[in-house]
């Protein structure tokens, strides 16, 4: 069965940056990824590369920053007063926090921490990176009505037929 819209694909992936450093590996976590094809759950270029692939296929897809997390935007790096953070909280570069932005909540990374100012970066940690996904398609199946209604696969361990029976 080929990967097409309204089908769920199960796959293993390894994500690497342009230097070849592994950033994520579903096999190492023993947790394959399931996604509903055609519902915008993955990057468009990644979904396009997987279209018509079948269980057993392997492929490597390299995405430019524009096709993945976007280019870095230095306007998203800013300074905030230290008083904007909880006084008792120890702050260290690399920490991530949820912050309210003009488009809703977003994750920011602390870049530098001073006595009076804290530098935060609202870029995605992988913004500006060229990324390569090595993919191994494990299975392809028809999505259930419940999955189509929700726009994503049901959580692992959920019986697809039980959900369908409950809806009837």
Image (cartoon, grey):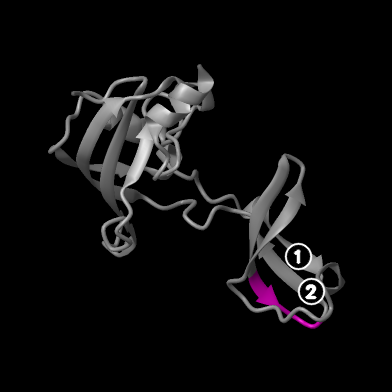
Q: Is residue 44 left or right of residue 19?
A: right
Q: Where is mark 1, residue-wise?
A: 79
Return the x and y of residue 117 as percentages of the image width and height: 79, 74
In the rendered image of this protein, does residue 71 appear above or below residue 2?
Answer: below
Disc 2/disc 1 C-alpha distance (Å): 6 Å
Dot 1 alpha-carbon crowd within 10 angstroms: few under 14, some 14 to 19, many 20 or more: some
Residue 75 part of the magenta segment: no
Q: Nearer the viewer, residue 25 or 65?
A: 25
Q: Nearer the viewer, residue 74 or 108?
A: 108
Residue farthest toward the right in the current orientation of the protein: 83
Q: Residue at x 14, y 37 (%)?
A: 57
Q: Where is mark 2, residue-wise?
A: 117
Dot 2 alpha-carbon crowd within 10 angstroms: few under 14, some 14 to 19, many 20 or more: some
Q: Quadrant of residue 42?
A: top left
Q: Nearer the viewer, residue 160 or 47?
A: 160
Return the x and y of residue 131 as percentages of the image width and height: 34, 50
Return the x and y of residue 107 as percentages of the image width and height: 64, 55
Q: Residue at x 34, y 45 (%)?
A: 33
Helix, strand or loop at label 2? It is strand
Give the label on residue 90, or none. none
Count the numbered circles shown. 2
Helix, strand or loop at label 1? It is strand
Question: Which badge, 2 or 1, is on the more N-terminal residue?
Answer: 1
Q: Residue at x 76, y 50 (%)?
A: 100
């Amino acid at each position: 069965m080929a990967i097409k819209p309204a089908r769920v694909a199960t796959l293993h992936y390894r994500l690497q940056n342009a230097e070849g450093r592994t950033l994520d590996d579903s096999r190492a976590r023993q947790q394959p990824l399931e996604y509903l094809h055609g519902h915008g759950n993955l990057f468009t270029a990644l979904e396009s590369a997987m279209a018509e692939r079948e269980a057993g296929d392997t492929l490597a897809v390299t995405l430019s920053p524009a096709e993945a997390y976007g280019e870095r935007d230095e306007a998203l790096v800013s300074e905030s007063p230290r008083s904007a953070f909880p006084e008792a909280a120890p702050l260290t570069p690399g920490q991530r926090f949820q912050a309210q932005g003009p488009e809703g909540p977003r994750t920011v990374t602390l870049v530098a921490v001073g006595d009076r100012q804290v530098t935060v970066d609202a870029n995605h940690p992988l913004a500006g990176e060229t990324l390569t996904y090595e993919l191994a398609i494990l299975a392809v199946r028809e999505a259930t009505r419940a999955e189509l209604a929700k726009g994503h696969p049901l959580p692992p361990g959920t019986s697809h037929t039980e959900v369908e029976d409950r809806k009837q």
